[in-house]
Amino acid sequence: MPSRQEQAEDLAPATISESDGVRYLHLGTPWVQGAMRIRKPQALELEYIQRMMAWMLFRPTEELCQGHAVQLGMGAAAITRFTHSVMKMRTTVVELNPTVIGVCRLWFKLPEEGARFKVLNMDAAEFAADADQHGSVDALCVDLYDHEAASPVLDSAAFYRDCRRLLSDGGVMSVNLFGRDASFERSASRIATAFGRDQVRTLRPTREGNTIVVALKGAGMPDRDELAARAENIETRFQLPARKWLRMIRVLPAEPGLNT
């Protein structure tokens, strides 16, 4: 069986559209895979992308912009631009589809590679499985969907265990669980199997159906007062709706669900 990397040539090509000052990324369908406001390229245009940054609430304020941020799935490079250019973090982005990388370089202001920024054209599963090679990660954003945005491409308990191994102690992962065919309960249960149920929180879904899950590695959950202080700092420094995120945070339901 060919590897996912060997299948890259069969992936849908990236295309773009524009409307009302916003440039959109597509993969051969009308489904939006990412967006950038042309006059504000560092801003996070899509609501679910903003909520993917809820991991910021779970990092101590003094460490917020320190360490290594990794994105699995480039999309329109919104999170990549933010962690690299706004937060000034060391940033790595992993993307299997070479046309997505090319379009982001041409049309979505993908940063130039250098000591603090790297683009890897590879399978996210292979990246996650090789923690020894890539080093520890402090903030991991996982947004992996096919061209029809039907369900996560990688969604097994084994994959989430690999993601946990990537993280440093105190590191945090955010995952986008959107999809017409995906089961949120099943996916969330797999994340809980890898991280521990008490280490996992969810946000309420967006109108479009994106539900963000946040999982910590080896760190106690901050209390509400600490989270409120962090949210105020995030809003002041980065103009992100962190206090709104705080009102959306939920623990996982008690039911264990499926773990396979």
Image (spheres, rainbow, N blue to C red):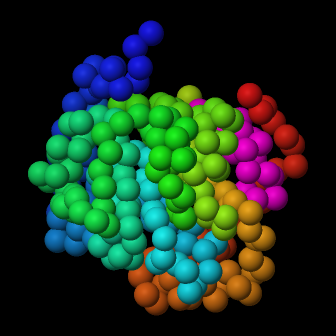
Q: Tell which residue pokes out farthest to the left in this image.
A: 106
Query: Which secondary structure dominates the residues rendered in magenta?
Result: helix
The answer to if 1 sits in the magenta stretch is: no
User: Residue 96: image x %, image y %?
Assistant: 34, 35
Q: Nearer the viewer, residue 182 or 155?
A: 155
Please tell me which residue is depicted at 53% across the width and 59% down the height of the picture: 137
Q: Nearer the viewer, residue 192 or 50?
A: 192
User: Residue 156: image x %, image y %?
Assistant: 64, 32
Position of residue 62 in the picture relative to residue 46 (left or right): right
User: Residue 61: image x %, image y %?
Assistant: 57, 84
- Which quarter shows the C terminus? top right
Instruction: Say above or below: 250 vs 245.
Output: above
The quadrant in which residue 80 appears is bottom left
Residue 244 can be seen in this image: no
Q: Which residues are magenta?
A: 182-204
Please tell me which residue is depicted at 74% across the width and 77% down the height of the picture: 222
Instruction: Say above or below: 60 vs 28.
Output: below
